[in-house]
Amino acid sequence: MWHDFLCILVENFSMKRIVEFMKRNYKVILLVTALSAILWSFIPSEKKDDPEKDKLLIELLTFVLEKGHYSPVDINDDFSKKVYKKYLDNIDPTKRFFLQGDIDDFSKYETSIDDMIKNKDLTFFNLTNSRLLKRMKESRAIYEEILSQPFDFTTKENINVDYEKLPYSKNQSELVDRWRKQLKLSALSSITDKQKLEEDKKKKEPSYTVKSFEEIEKDVRKNSLKSLNEYFDFIEKELDRDDWFAMFLNSIVERYDPHTFYFSPDDKEKFDVSMSGTFQGIGARLQKKNDAVEVSELISGGPAWRGKELEAGDLILKVGQGKEEPLDIAGMRLDDVVKKIKGPKGTEVRLTVKKVDGSIKVISIIRDEVETEETFAKSSIVEKEGKRFGIIYLPKFYISFENKQNRDAFKDVASEIEKLKAQNIDGLIMDLRDNGGGSLETVVKMVGLFIPEGPVVQVKAPGRNPEILPDPDKRVQYDGPLVVMINNFSASASEIFAAAIQDYKRGIVVGSKHSYGKGTVQNVIDLNQFIRGNSYGDLGALKTTIQKFYRINGGSTQREGVKSDIVFPDRFSYLDMGERDEESALPWDKIEPAKYQPLNINYDNVIANSKKRIASNPTFNLIDENAKWIYQRKDENVFSLNLNDFKRELDATDVKIKKFKAISDYKNNFVFTSLPDEVALFEKDTLLKQKRERWHEDMQKDIYIEETLNVISDMKMLTKGKSIPQKFSMN
């Protein structure tokens, strides 16, 4: 069977997919933690166009997906239509290249891609790719002409950026006008930003001569021209047929589910490099979001983290090298953006970012060596009303499949628990916010730290009965009050942990209204193993879904996620985020529950008290108001291209931004301290000390931590003098 020779994984959201596509409301980009355990032998070969290799790849991918995917799809006309739409959205997301005439030429293949896949016919790809490259080449003359003359910002006109619903341009004239409006909107944004900077300079230095509007506008057009030239130069010189063909292949394989993905040889190699543990850059993980790039996570200790300006959720609009003019990255592949941001230690990169509240900011970061140490578990002590509570933050469920002697999340968390117990804690908080998952083996063993023997999760392959994975250790390492913190980005293995704790009533789950909702397991398959005497070079790899996992109560976490016992308002409260936002996501379903016995503990009063505190808390109320405001703005797609109107819209936004600034000003009165063994290291490891101090500062600004402490304090009173049974169930 497939899993007899492949490593079975629970996908990790914390390691981001190397290449991601555009035009999605939200996408948590995916890779697999345990990929580091899979070794590939690279066959060096010169890159060249090879249609026979492309045909072989199509044949291999369809074969592997048919035989190995959890839920193979019918490759029919409906499948063809969806691939057709997805592919065109990927290669021309803002509809500034193709004309309606091009689409008319392409449309004859809309229901034929299924047949072309079966026949290994490359006609559709060859046609669209050659046409795209032709249109891109023609685009140079369009934007050069537009940017050669000043924009007229006095005219009353708007632009609609809902490109999903926008029709293709009927003719060249319409296409030129689309380019003009897109460039004009970009110029407006840059001009207003530069005017504010000029005003700030004048305030700081009264003798400073402010640049005129005409000077600023000219500079903006000049910079736009340079950025576009650099972008198109990059496309022409650095992207080859393999890159475009990989995009086409992924338009096909992602129709199976969002977590099925083809890695080209280059992408596979880049990932191997990323797994080395260190790199030179800014220390930020990125993901594609529509036509922009979103900061999904900051690596603790990295330059971006130390600078305190860049935040998760920021959209990167432009990238500048040192004093050079920034490059507009709209439409650029994620991998290409990463290349622009990475660089040698000691060099400067300037990021133009759009904050969640809509404000624009230029952030300067000096690149440095970035270590992934902060991917490991860490703990802290906090006192509240004479009681001591422990907090363990776990960013992912890591494990080394190559060497079981290396550290893994289970062993590290077990060690942190022992150290916390030595400090006589009265309760424990497991912080799994933003934890994208990891090893299935690890999460099963970790649940076992908190329960006696019993089932933890059920795993089902197609055509087979569910397999119940139990806690292998009868011992209970920690039997005190337990709270699990989750958010919208807690996925996969973290959902297994939270669900098991919730089903056993071993603790209370708090956080976002639900977790991400990824209830599937993936394999990474080296395609080279299927070809003997391969003369085509490295064929890459396919990550494909092979199983679904289920809670012990029988329900799937797929799409639905784990629903918090206590819901904390957050800025995404009214957005439908997660797996449920994915068109091709596998459905929710349920199976027979496992045999298990939950604890006889009633948390109703604890939950009710928390809900009352949240409802009466001004900061939580402001967070909720902010969430409603963000929800209301999500469909704002029409923007004025008149300077005065544009500024009025910005001013109105600024008023709201100032109101919600109180959220970031929040600070609790708790004191967080490191454990004695870490404190002993601080004298020699000043960076570690800085990391922990920063973490403690963040927790002091975290209202969710404060309410979680209130919850676990109430639980301590509820469970005083009680202990958990030594056995929950036997399978």
Image (cartoon, grey):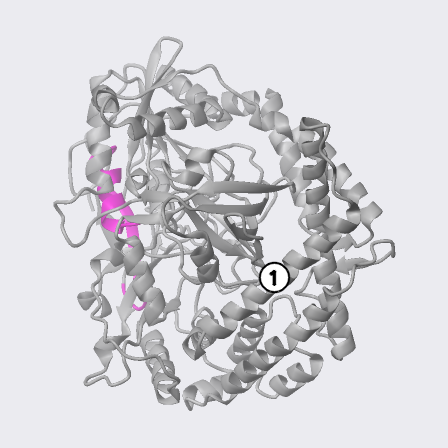
Q: Decide whether residue 42 is among the magenta residues.
A: no
Q: Is residue 183 left or right of residue 705?
A: right
In percent of width and height, residue 259 lies at: 41, 62
Q: Viewer-proximal residue, 358 or 615?
A: 358
Quadrant showing the N terminus: bottom left
Q: Is residue 574 left or right of residue 727?
A: right
In percent of width and height, residue 679 lies at: 25, 20
Q: Tell me the quarter of the picture where residue 374 sits.
A: top left
Q: Is residue 347 left or right of residue 524?
A: right
In percent of width and height, residue 194 lies at: 69, 44
Q: Viewer-proximal residue, 506 or 594?
A: 506
Q: Decide whether residue 452 is among the magenta residues.
A: yes
Q: Residue at x 34, y 68 (%)?
A: 266
Q: Tell me the quarter of the picture where residue 170 sits.
A: bottom right
> To which residue does mark 1 refer?
226
Magenta-highlighted residues: 438-464
Within 10 angstroms of label 1, few (less than 14), some, or many (20 or more) residues? some
In percent of width and height, residue 321 lies at: 50, 51
